[in-house]
Amino acid sequence: MGEWRPPRCRNRPGFRETPLSDSESQTHLKIQGLDRYGRGLSTFGGQRVTIPGTLPDEVADVTLYPRNGRVWGRVLDLQAHASDRVPAACEFDNICPGCTMRHVSPRRQISIYEQTVRAALRRRLDVGPLPIEFLGHAGRDHYRTRAIARALVTKSGALRLGIVGYQDTIPLSKCAVQTHRVQALLSQLESELGSLGLRYYDSETRTGEIRHIVVDAYQNLDETGLVSERVVICLGRPLQHEWTENTFLADQQGTAVAYDILPFRRPGTFKNPVPLRHGLSVHFRVGPDVIKSTLPAWCPQSPNTVQVVQDTLLDWLSPKPNETIVEVGCGSGTNTLALARRSKMVIGLDNCRAAVSDARHNLDGATVSNASIRLGTAERGIGRIGRECPRLDKAVCHGMRVPFGPRAMAQLSSLKPKTIVMIGPSPNSLAADIRELRKYRIQRYGIVDQTPGTPLVLSMVQLHRISD
């Protein structure tokens, strides 16, 4: 078989990429390694082949096909199985780009996470061998309480709420990691949207209506009147008719419903959601506290691990009754309440106006008075806090997928907190920020597997200030 170079092709919603003819596309390959997403890698004709659902040293019969200008393989049969393989227990395992490691044993997954963390530390920091603690994990199935489902089209032309897989679309209403309640809401919405004749929005032709659907569904709370479920229907363009509060999910009166019209360029997840029923807030429980979160404030996707993170934070930070703590990226106050109960004062900072309002509401509802929540970015807010509060004993930084940056970290270091705990989903971003904290050293590094079966892992780092 000669060398085959795939053409550049476009991954449109519902677009099925065509493999080569049977006489040319099927081959027999040995898996040589994994990429950073946990997908198997091999070579064919001098080119790299990505083969999802495989492990190193396995031998597979595959069909080769082009995707986004690269060579991919779809497994027809495995001739040799790795010892770390477990049943995926998902009908979409071989075509899903999300849970790329459902077929990998928990022990091997942790090893992959550790390799990812150590590689990030080597690239950014000059540190020796560092023990990495495994702090906890979510359940393997039905753990995810949030779904962002794209509007797609099936081969028969019907509307589908899901994600684009390898060679086909995947309905999130059948996704093994979504909770049963999320699955039910997506299934009902898919039916109701389709019955209204609504289609997926094509940004090239600017036809259709629906871009994506966002569902948050937490466990029902005993408190009367508190909404724990929310659905947002995100559109690509304005509609000619109006929706009412009972247009969707009329039989689910406890579920909040909203819609949003996203801009043509850089639409993002939300722009300016408009409530149809029950506003834009949901409520969920963390320990003894009920947390209110209003769009676009952050909501946990796997609530079972939130308590693990909070327990570790309290253990590593060890707040004392005479200490003042600054919490950068406090969000809706998920951890602020617990920190305030154990310290003299907590100063929270977040750049999301809705999250700041929710945090203040949650503090009032819990009758916690020794916490102050500020609105602002890390770069500007930390400096203002330092000028107002001469003594800060400890700090918490809730990071995202991009670093806070050198300026924010320099300001944080100038406040001289004895201990800093950094939390974030990106080891690379955390390492970049830690590099700027030159007067601090890593004491402990832990990981939380919030999304089992995926290559993503939450990192927690404890830093201690060294002598000036």
Image: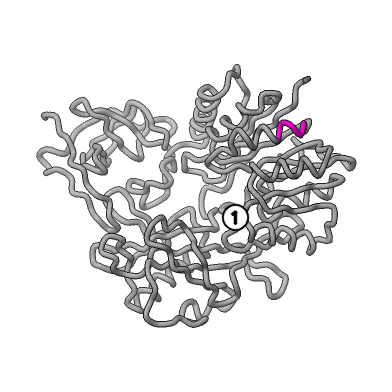
- Local crowd size for mark 1, using a 10 Å CA cut-off: few (<14), some (14–19), many (≥20): few
Name the image quarter holding residue 295.
bottom right
Q: Position of residue 10 (x, y in %)?
A: 24, 50
The vertical placement of 155 against 395, above or below, is below
Whether residue 162 is in magenta: the answer is no
What colouring method underlies this structural image? one colour
Label 1 sits on a secondary structure element that is loop
Q: Position of residue 261 (x, y in %)?
A: 44, 68
Name the image quarter holding residue 445.
top right
Residue appearing at x 15%, y 39% in the figure = 25
Residue appearing at x 71%, y 24% in the figure = 439
The vertical placement of 450 against 293, above or below, is above
Chief secondary structure of the magenta span?
A: helix
Q: How many marks?
A: 1
Q: Position of residue 14 (x, y in %)?
A: 27, 58
Q: Is residue 151 left or right of residue 296?
A: left
Q: Is residue 403 left or right of residue 415?
A: left
Looking at the rendered image, the quarter that the C terminus falls into is top right
Q: Position of residue 405 (x, y in %)?
A: 58, 36
Q: Which residues are magenta?
A: 412-416
Q: Is residue 238 left or right of residue 395?
A: left
Q: Which residue is disc 1 drawn over?
A: 298
Which is more toward the observer, 276 or 101?
Answer: 276
The vertical placement of 107 against 138, above or below, is above
Q: Amino acid at mark 1?
A: Trp
Which is more toward the observer, 379 or 53?
Answer: 379
